[in-house]
Amino acid sequence: MSESSNLGPAPSTRNRKAILWPSTSLVVALVVPVALAVFIMYQLDPFDPAPYPAHELVNLEKPVLVVPKRNPHVLKGAEKIGVGELVEPEDMAYDLKSGVIYTGCGDGWVKRVTVNESADDSVVENWINTGGRPLGLVLGHHGEIIVADADKGLLNVTANREIQLLTDEADGVKFKLTDGVDIADNGILYFTDASYKYNLLEVSRDSLEARPYGRFMSYNPSTKETKVLVRDLYFANGVAVSPDQNFVVFCETPMRRCKKYYIKGERKGSVDIFVDNLPGMPDNIRYDGEGQYWIALTTEATFAWKLAQRYPFIRKIVAIMEKYLKRQLRVQQNGGALAVDLEGKPTSWYHDHHLSLVTGVIRIGDWLYFGTFKKPYIIRLNIERNPAVAIE
Ligand SMILES: *[C@@H]1O[C@H](CO)[C@@H](O)[C@H](O)[C@H]1NC(C)=O
Ligand SMILES: *[C@@H]1O[C@H](CO)[C@@H](O)[C@H](O)[C@H]1NC(C)=O
């Protein structure tokens, strides 16, 4: 049987024309009502995105940071850990003593992962279910794990696996999306609420609206006092205390930057830029004990997203479309991990076009571990064997 016999009769020239050149009446019948419906929806929808302040827009449109070394193909040498046993592991905390990685999952479980040289022999155990959505994690000073739980607030999960709520509001305003946490040597906890308006399910709306609903705070376990240290932040996310205990870094995701808040010395209480014009949207940030902070980057800022940041009406159209389609429309790509030194200078960047929603990165010896908000596993890469190198 020849191939052409499967194709059926060829469409007549007249039909082909009709497909290519729809008649004016077809345009009127189809396009006009759709355009009208969109216009009316736009007018009626109460969603009200804000323009970014001019100085913020200038920053957002600056060229991205140049990183001296990079590995742009992280997925090539990477391995998967805990496939199918981990649901969207967001952040990780490593307990050196037991060799266990704690990670918070999308089903509410904080899981314990014992890694092995052979990725397939790594062991995953259920540890505790918060009943919420554990995001940032850090080891406490008394064998406890402190959890920034998006739904519940800041939690103390004791070594006996009891859950205590430490705090879930400040200045009379409840947290909606407790996100990142770290602990200082003196036991003070530093943490963020990404937004007091939108919860984790509405996270897309927060960046489309572009108003700063985030706060950076501290919690003192001895006085049980919660203090707002910096308010009016754009999606306040990851937190890391500097090893010299002089300042605390916190990241603002849509602004592609991390700031530092001084907790000691002359500048105590003031805020500086730690690093900005990042090559992606920062999520958690972790210090590796060896001079590098690792910043998880969820996605690069695509051209479309930059355009949307500039024009609120585009963000409104996207918000309306997402509402009716019930899914996020934004393209997330080229996520990864950026290492910066103690001064915030970039040193190396591990990324991949096909990697997205990287939310937490920790380094253990020669290995980088990537938590993601989308995958059912942790990704790890041996950076001795797959190093970042000078490009260009
Ligand atoms: C890795 O797993 C194998 C098989 O389960 C085990 O024999 C070995 O001790 C493990 N190695 C480490 C470092 O945990
Ligand atoms: C967490 O609870 C344990 C047990 O009650 C306690 O020892 C520890 O100090 C608590 N941690 C914080 C940060 O409150």
Image: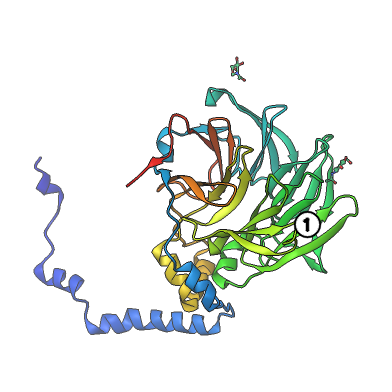
Q: Position of residue 90 (x, y in %)?
A: 61, 46
Q: Is residue 283 above or below residue 14?
A: above
Q: Is residue 137 above or below residue 365?
A: below
Q: Residue at x 60, y 67 (%)?
A: 206
Q: Quadrant for residue 71, please give it.
A: top left
Instruction: Determine whether, in the image, residue 234 is placed left or right of residue 266.
Output: left
Q: Is residue 257 above or below residue 335?
A: below
Which of the pair 167/221 is nearer the observer?
Answer: 221
Q: Position of residue 223 (x, y in %)?
A: 90, 54
Q: Residue at x 54, y 64 (%)?
A: 255
Q: Position of residue 292 (x, y in %)?
A: 57, 43
Q: Quadrant of ligand 1?
A: top right
Outermost residue toward the right? Answer: 223
The residue type indicated by label 1 comes to Ser
Which quadrant of the figure contains the N terminus?
top left
Q: How many marks?
A: 1
Instruction: Determine whether, in the image, residue 24 is placed left or right of residue 160.
Output: left
Disc 1 C-beta below 8 A from ligand 2: no
Q: Quadrant for residue 105, please give it.
A: top right
Say which element carries label 1. Answer: strand
Q: Which residue in the protein does label 1 denote? A: 218
Which of the pair 190/105 is nearer the observer?
Answer: 190
Q: Residue at x 84, y 40 (%)?
A: 162
Q: Is residue 192 above or below residue 379?
A: below
Instruction: Determine whether, in the image, residue 297 is placed left or right of residue 272.
Output: left
